[in-house]
Image (cartoon, rainbow, N blue to C red):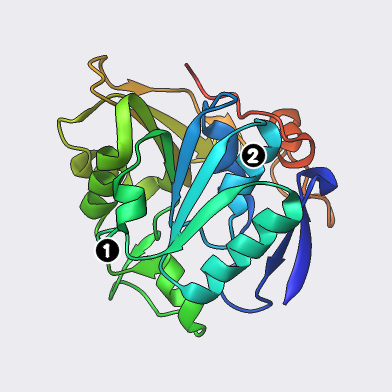
Amino acid sequence: MTHDAFLGGRLHLHQPARGFRGGIDAVLLAAACPARPGDHVLDLGCGVGTAALCLGVRVPGLRLAGVELQEDYAALARRNAHEAGQEMDVHCADLTRLPDALRARSFDHVIANPPYYERGKGSAAPDPGRDTALAGDTPLTAWCDAATRRLKPKGWLTMIQKADRLGDVLTAMDARLGSIMVQPLAPRTGQEAHLVIVRARKGGRAPLRLAAPIILHNGVSHPGDQDHYTSAISAVLRDAAALPVAD
């Protein structure tokens, strides 16, 4: 077990030393969610609570809830929320079979970082927990359906996914979701995006928008051991700033 600092030390999380660990992707997801104080936010596949708790640091007064399939990770999410002084209602459940307590609620925002790979495509991770997190059995259509059902009318789904699965994400978003905005995240200027943030609104009717890429790193390579993040990304990772996603 490790105890790791996030957001410049504003948040500390217990995580398994081996297995799936929260990292920059979860922090970027949290920074892209346009939540406001007092909003109700559900994190699907919350892991140890990284995204939801990072969002709670940036936006005070949120009503947080999380769903996590693996009990060990759900227990860590509860512990992390308690130690961070944040209230987060964490359920260990399959997102396709949510407990009645969550089915009775609706949310202003749903955030999600679904597995990046489909089961059977690519090599399995050696740690079972990491393998489940990275290569899930639940299709993206089920993730989007679960999110849509739990959203209030005009509520927002914010998702992070590998860029090469953008087509799968858009296909999974049925007619209940609209006003879709795609925000590419590119490692460096001139390079292809590796990740995308996708926002969609329940009942939205605006046309799809593709934003200009947000660049993560300066220069053409890491200078020595320095991360050399751009100023915008450094502000997100170290100062709990919002990601400058196109509105």
The residue that mark 2 highlights is 56
Residue 17 is marked as none
Q: Residue placed farthest to the left in the image?
A: 175
Whichever of labels 2 and 1 marks the residue nearer the N terminus, that label is 2
- Residue at x-position 18% and y-position 30%: 176
x%, y% of residue 63? 54, 38
Q: Is residue 169 left or right of residue 80?
A: left
Task: Please state, as top left, top right, bottom left or bottom right, where the N terminus lies in the image.
Answer: bottom right
Number of labels in the image equals 2
Tell me the CA gap for discs 2 and 1.
Answer: 27 Å
> Of the residues tagged 2 and 1, which is closer to the observer?
2
* Nearer to us in this view, 134 or 121: 134
- Can you see residue 186? no
The image quadrant of residue 242 is: top right
- Residue at x-position 83% and y-position 57%: 225
Q: Is residue 120 left or right of residue 45?
A: left
Residue type at the position of mark 1: Thr
- Can you see residue 83? yes
Q: Residue placed farthest to the bottom in the image?
A: 126
Residue type at the position of mark 2: Gly
Question: Above or below — where is 167 with respect to 154?
Answer: below
The image quadrant of residue 139 is: bottom left
Local crowd at mark 2 within 10 Å, few (<14), some, or many (≥20)?
many
Question: Above or below — where is 137 with respect to 247?
Answer: below
x%, y% of residue 240? 73, 35
Local crowd at mark 1 within 10 Å, few (<14), some, or many (≥20)?
some
The residue that mark 1 highlights is 138
Q: Are marks 2 and 1 in contact (CB under 8 Å)?
A: no
x%, y% of residue 150? 31, 40
